[in-house]
Image (cartoon, rainbow, N blue to C red):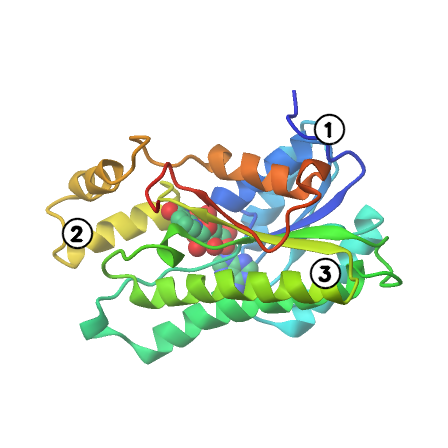
Amino acid sequence: MAKFDLKGRKALVTGGARGIGAGIAEALAAAGASVMIGDVLADLGRETASRLSASGAKMGFVPLDVTKDGDWASATETTVKELGGFDILVNNAGIEITSLVIDVDGDDLRRMLDVNVAGTLLGMKHAFRAMRPGGGAGGGGAVVNIASVAATIAFPAIAGYSATKSAVDRATRVAAMESGKLGYGVRVNCIYPGLVPTDMGMKLASDIVAAGLAPSVEAAVGDVIGQTPLGRLGEVGDMADVVVFLCSDAARFITGAGIAVDGGMGM
Ligand code: NAI
């Protein structure tokens, strides 16, 4: 049984083709929302949407590169048209390119800034335009940005990524303040996931080994678990449940908040 009710809500989840985003799309649908997945991976995105629709939920896929303003305009329009509104945006799409500071590459940094920071801000721009009163999407809503525990603590070999996720954290606060003060009626929050063994999470563990910071992937993962008071890695469902809560009316007085979903790693 769904823990929070999102019946009638219409959601767009970026980077929903796989990993944490696919889990968030599934959990929103299980809570009663209609969900559009936006991703650069069109085949996988369609496959995920069709798999999740087997539960009876209304699901769709829209091609979306979050770095492109024009893609956002059409993804927003498609969401409103196909779902009949747009009141939840989960800015989940993100990339991580591991590097020690001593080896930092400018192009890699700019790519991460583009996807993680510009992608999130462009998403909030289009969500605000559509969701604010008279915006055409029904009015009111919720945005959840996926930051990272890396925005709250130092972890080696991810200085660039950490910088982008700290930016997501700060942008969340400013956006929440603007939305509140200007009467857009959109709550904006973020979560800080701990390490989750998705494609991204496991690649990071291998990169840590390649950077000479751990003797093996098992040791790298073991180090993270050792730093986590709850004694395990995060699961996709741990993240998805908190996103569902933040999108629900149970969180109606929460905006501009960042919630650590990291087993206590960043406390
Ligand atoms: P993943 O790499 O498994 O999935 C990321 C998804 O985003 C993919 O479907 C990918 O195609 C999509 N994507 C990438 N660039 C895109 C773009 N320009 N436009 C649209 N879609 C794009 O990653 P994972 O682990 O599921 O991560 C999801 C989010 O959670 C990311 O923002 C990540 O930074 C964050 N996160 C992940 C953690 C982890 O340990 N896995 C820890 C903390 C935060």
Q: Which residue is mark 2?
A: 209
Location of residue 14 with respect to 202 vertically, above or below? below
- Asked if ligand 1 lies within 8 A of label 3, the reply is no
Q: Position of residue 20 (x, y in %)?
A: 49, 43
x 45%, y 71%: residue: 113
Say whether residue 90 is visible: no
Q: Which of labels 1 and 3 is toward the front?
A: 3
Vertical placement of residue 266 versus 117, above or below:
above
Q: Is there any visible trace of residue 161 in the rendered image?
A: yes
Give the amino acid type for the residue marked by disc 3 in the picture. Gly
Q: Label 1 sits on what residue type? A: Gly
Residue lying farthest to the top in this orientation: 1
Q: Is residue 69 left or right of residue 181?
A: left
Residue ID at (61%, 34%): 27
- Which numbered circle lies on residue 180? 3
Q: Which mark is residue 56?
A: 1
Labels 3 and 2: the sequence-earlier one: 3
**Quick check: 42 left or right of 235?**
right
